[in-house]
Image (cartoon, rainbow, N blue to C red):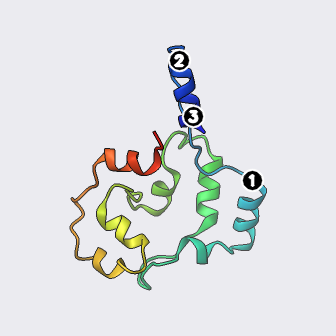
Amino acid sequence: MAADCAVELRASNVAFVSLWPGAVRTEFFTHMVKTQTADGFFNAGRAENEPKFDCSIIYSIALSTEYEGKAVVALATGREPMNIRQLSTLMQMNPKTRWLANIVPNFIYLPKWMLALSGNKF
């Protein structure tokens, strides 16, 4: 929808930006934190020796204004967030290529124009 608006407003010399929010305090997220039922969702495909995802840490940091504007997930786990352009990350997401993701070096990235082609209809 953002791409459609941008195309229509381009003739008027108006820029259109789509902002994607991070974790927000919704009923679903609050329920996940209270019941701790999100472990299967967030830990799918992880190795057994990796730490489990704790929703309560993310929830408490998300409510604080101390870390406003920063990646809450990276602060809570101490790990770098996943990079969607990294080839090994993309291979981790697909069960058929997950075994190959450990062999592919982390410095191989997809060009940004390839991602733009996959999500842009223009």
Q: Residues within 10 Å of mark 2 (few under 14, many from 20)?
A: few
Q: Nearer the viewer, residue 86 or 62?
A: 86
Q: Quadrant of the C terminus?
A: top left
- Spatial distance from mark 1 to mark 3, Cα to Cα? 28 Å
Which SS class for mark 3? helix
Residue depicted at x 35% and y 77%: 97
Which residue does the numbered mark 3 point to in the structure image?
4
Q: Nearer the viewer, residue 71 or 3?
A: 3
Q: Position of residue 53 (x, y in %)?
A: 54, 71
Q: Is residue 7 above or below residue 22?
A: above
Q: Is residue 11 above or below residue 65?
A: above
Which mark lies nearer to you, 1 or 3? 3
Residue 39, quarter of the rendered image: bottom right
Q: Which circle marks residue 1 in the picture?
A: none
Q: Mark 2: which amino acid?
A: Val
Which residue does the numbered mark 2 point to in the structure image?
14
Answer yes or no: is residue 110 visible.
Answer: yes
Q: Is residue 26 above or below residue 87?
A: above
Q: Quadrant of the N terminus?
A: top right
Residue depicted at x 50% and y 21%: 10
Residue depicted at x 45% and y 78%: 46
* Residue 51 in the figure: left or right of residue 36: left
Q: Are marks 1 and 3 in contact (CB under 8 Å)?
A: no
Q: Position of residue 63 (x, y in %)?
A: 66, 48
Q: Mark 1: which amino acid?
A: Thr
Q: Mark 3: which amino acid?
A: Asp
Which residue does the numbered mark 1 point to in the structure image?
26
Q: Position of residue 48 (x, y in %)?
A: 44, 85
Q: Position of residue 91 (x, y in %)?
A: 35, 70
Residue 107, quarter of the rendered image: bottom left
- Spatial distance from mark 2 to mark 3, Cα to Cα? 13 Å
**Pointer 1 or 3: first along the chain:** 3
